[in-house]
Image (cartoon, helix red, strand yellow):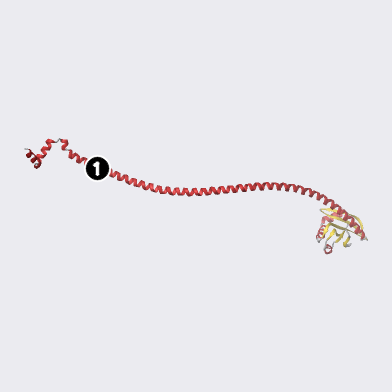
Amino acid sequence: MREEFLRLLHESPTFRDEVRRILLTEELLDLPARTERLRAEMHEELTRIWQAIGAQTERIERVEAQIASLTERMERVEAQIASLTERMERVEAQIASLTERMERVEAQIASLTERMERVEAQIASLTERIDTLTRQIGHFQHQWGLETEEIAHDLMRRFLEAKGWAILRGGPLQYDGEVDLVFAVRTDDRTFTVAVEVKGRIWSQTPMDDLLTKIRRPDFASALRRGAYPEPVRPAVFGFILYTGAREAAEQAGVGLFSPHGEVVPVSPP
């Protein structure tokens, strides 16, 4: 009987299904189908997972590419920062050098300012001394001028009288300017005026020209009339020291020339 059962189980699908139906529950019978569905679901889920993994991999690759690009950019930025840092260090070194130079220049300026102040103080002191000397020299010159004019006045009076001329009056003549000495002279039946310019030293024709310019001025003629000095006027120059060429200059100008020793170029009556 056992053998028969095994034969039928082996040979008859209907018998085999009936035995399976009797021996197995509905759940066990449905297990292959459920397994197939589970396999299909797992396959579908794995497909979705692989798709998600592929999408994530692609995103990761893009992120990695971005990271690589950012890394490259960061390296360039860091290189630029390093270059800027180096340039900044050079600039700071230059600023430090310039600051040091400026401090030295400022110290030099301060020293020069101090020296200038001392020089200015010395100049002020010298200026004051020069002003004092100038006043003293002016006083001496005034005194010397008065004395030389007095000496020239006395000598000229003596020299003119030695020519046989009578001196009617004499002295300086003031107008819008000055002629040092004028003498009203009478000789024979003529009267005229001798105008004398007094100089310390004579070496050129300049004093003669200056005197001729003075006696040609209208205000000089007016001053002569107010002082009762007769015209015409004969010019002469008196020099305490005569240099070479003074005689020739006087002769060329037509002006009389005198020194403390006497008449050098005669003054002719009109």
The residue that appears at 81% across and 49% down in the rendered structure is 136
Q: Is residue 13 above or below residue 159?
A: above
Residue 15, x across and y down, in percent: 9, 39
Q: Specify whether 248 is left or right of 16.
A: right
The residue that appears at 18% across and 38% down in the rendered structure is 31
Report which quarter residue 148 is drawn in: bottom right
Foreground: 129 or 20? 20
The residue that appears at 84% across and 52% down in the rendered structure is 144
Q: Specify whether 63 is left or right of 144.
A: left
Image quarter where the N terminus lies is: top left
Circle 1 sits in a helix, a strand or a loop, which is it? helix
Is any atom of residue 133 visible in this view? yes
Image quarter where the C terminus lies is: bottom right
Q: Specify whether 113 is left or right of 234.
A: left
The residue that appears at 11% across and 37% down in the rendered structure is 19
Q: Name the residue under label 1.
A: 44
Q: In this view, does 101 lie above or below 202?
A: above
Foreground: 214 or 207? 207
Residue 218, x across and y down, in percent: 82, 56
How many labels were placed on the picture? 1
Q: How would you rate the neighbour count of disc 1 (Cα within 10 Å): few for under 14, some for 14-19, many for 20 or more?
A: few
Q: Specify whether 210 is left or right of 35.
A: right
Foreground: 250 or 41? 41
Is any atom of residue 232 visible in this view? no
Q: What residue type is labelled 1?
A: Glu
Residue 186, x across and y down, in percent: 92, 58
Residue 189, x across and y down, in percent: 93, 60
